[in-house]
Structure formats: structure tokens, C-alpha cells
Image (spheres, grey):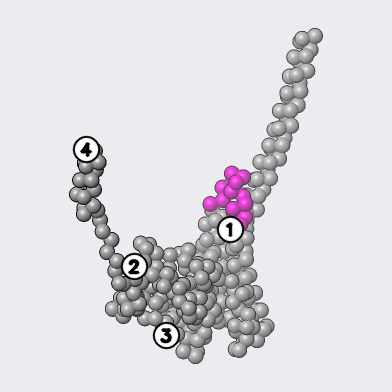
Amino acid sequence: MKRLLWLLVCLVGVPLLPVRVMSAEPPAAQPGGSGCLTCHASLEDEEMSKAVPAWQQSVHKTAGIGCQDCHGGSPKSMVKEQAHDPNAGYIGIPDPTAVPEQCGKCHQVQRDNYIPSPHGTVGEFIPNCVDCHSDHKVVPADVVKISTPKRCGDCHTDDILDQFNGVITGVLTPIAQAKQAAADLRPAGVPVDHIDAGADLAREMFRQKVSHVFVFQTIVPRADSVKASLKKVDTDIRAARTEVSTRRKFGIVAAGFLVILAGFIWLYRRTLSE
């Protein structure tokens, strides 16, 4: 009787189970993923596939900037015609002259400084953003790695590159050192928010006034004004370090006093017991 009941349940229940219909089209990309990455990673054409591992090492991945943000199209589709649909904004490889505007959607200050600069007006936007920062493996900017004879030697002599690197690093290095000093001092319990804020303000001044200007007569005095703004930050760092040193000395003195006091108490109690 029980077997008969189970048989009836199976006969009635099986038709009600969801049936997965196989589609002739490739499956859509997983939610939150990118069909661009999935598809291009599987291509045999190295020129088309190498962009995937390059992008995965970039700051754009960390910032959530995907393929569609630069190339347009529909990143959720695994069907080429849909992913590359012009109606979805697909532009493929941006025209070199359009790259600064494309990057400028996020990097407005850099674009506004770059466009009127010698790099932005000479040679039809060449060199443009990707020539210096790469196209897919975009890593944190490092002027010393970018301004090299290999990249810039066709137009600039080594001494000019060295001079340019010196001006830029002469501003960015003390800013980075101030940020590091604040991080090192914070665990000691001294106030460092004002040091962080001062370094951030200097960094923003550099970004607004110096970054991507590329004219010595302009960037040198502006860089000097940014460095001048760091003098108060340096004073605050020295004051914070002095306070930390004072606290440590006071702690040592207090600890010594307590040890001596404990010794006197021990001797006193021993005298009473005798």
C-alpha cells in the first residue's frame, strides 16, 4: 500500500518540477560580473584576451571601473552582437583624440590641466592619457616610472626629464611622508587628524595646480607654493613627536616612582612584621 502511494506521488509530482530549457544562445554573465571579461578571457587572439589580466591588476578594478565605462556596450551579455551593440553605447577602441575627454569623465581636473598644455595641443592630443598611464593595467601614478627616456626620449632630453621628476617628487614626497608620520603617530594617542588634513589639502593643491600642466614656468612656482603650505604640517608633526616623547618620559618616570614606592611599602610591612 505504501509503495502504491509513493508511486502516485511521483507520477503526480514529476510534471510539477521545474524544467530547465536549454537555450541555443550562450548564457548571460553572472550578476555583478562582466560578460566582457568572461568572453575575452576565452579568446585565442592574445591581443584581445590580454586586456583581462591587465585590467584585473589595475586600480580601475579596485575603483569599480569596468570595460563598458571606457568602451561602452552591454557588459551583461555574452552574445557579441548584443555586447557590441552601438545602441548600447559601444564605441570599441576610443579614438586617440577622444581619450582625454573619455578619461576626463572621472578625472576632470587632470583633463582640464592637460588639454591646454603642450601635450594637449601639440600633435593632436599625443601623447594622451594611455600613452603615459597604460590602457588596461592602470596602476597608481608614479612620475619617476612614467617620465623615462623610453617614454619621453623622442622629444625630451634626460636632463629635462630629471628636472621635471625633481619638481614633482619634491612636492609629492613630503606629502607622502606627512601622511606616513600621521599614521605612525596615531597609535600613540596624540591628535593627528589636523596633520592628515593638512597633507590632504597639499595633495589637492598639487592636483589642482601642478598635475598635468607640463609647463616649467607654471609648475615650478606652483609647486613651491604647495611645499610652503606644508611648513605648518611639519611644525605640527614635530609638536606631535615631542608630545609622544614627553609622554613616554613621563611614563618611565611614573613607572620608576611606582617601583620605588612599592619597595618602600614592602620594607615598611616587613618592619612591622618584625
Q: Amino acid at mark 2?
A: Ala
**Residue occupying image coordinates x 54% and y 64%:** 202
Task: Name the residue beneath numbered marker 1.
Answer: 179
Report whether residue 110 is seen: no
Q: Disc 2 vs disc 4: Cβ atoms closer than 8 Å?
A: no
The residue that mark 3 highlights is 95
Task: Indicate left or right for 139 with 69 as reference.
Answer: right
- The local crowd at label 4, few if under 14, some if 14 to 19, many if 20 or more residues have their Cα within 10 Å, is few
Badge 1: how crowded within 10 Å, few (<14), some, or many (20+)?
some
Q: Which residue is mark 4?
A: 1
Q: Quarter holding the N terminus?
A: top left
Q: Is residue 197 above or below residue 58?
A: above
Who comes first in sequence, dot 4 or dot 3? 4
The Cα–Cα distance between marks 4 and 3, rounded to whole angstroms, is: 76 Å
Disc on the earlier residue, 2 or 4: 4
Front in this rendered view, residue 11 or 35: 11
First in residue order: circle 2 vs circle 3: 2
Magenta-colored segment: predominant secondary structure: helix
Task: Characterize the local packing of mark 2: few (<14), some (14-19) or many (20 or more) Cα atoms within 10 angstroms.
Answer: some
Front position among marks 3 and 1 = 3
Q: CA distance from mark 2 to mark 4?
A: 47 Å
Q: Earlier in the sequence, mark 3 or mark 1?
A: 3
Q: In the rendered structure, which amino acid carries the disc numbered 4?
A: Met
| Residue at the (72%, 35%) spot, across then down | 253
Residue bearing the label numbered 2: 28
Mark in front: 1 vs 2:
2
* Sequence-first disc among 1 and 4: 4
Residue 188 belongs to the span the image colors magenta: yes
Residue type at numbered disc 1 = Lys
| Rendered view: 38 above or below 243 | below
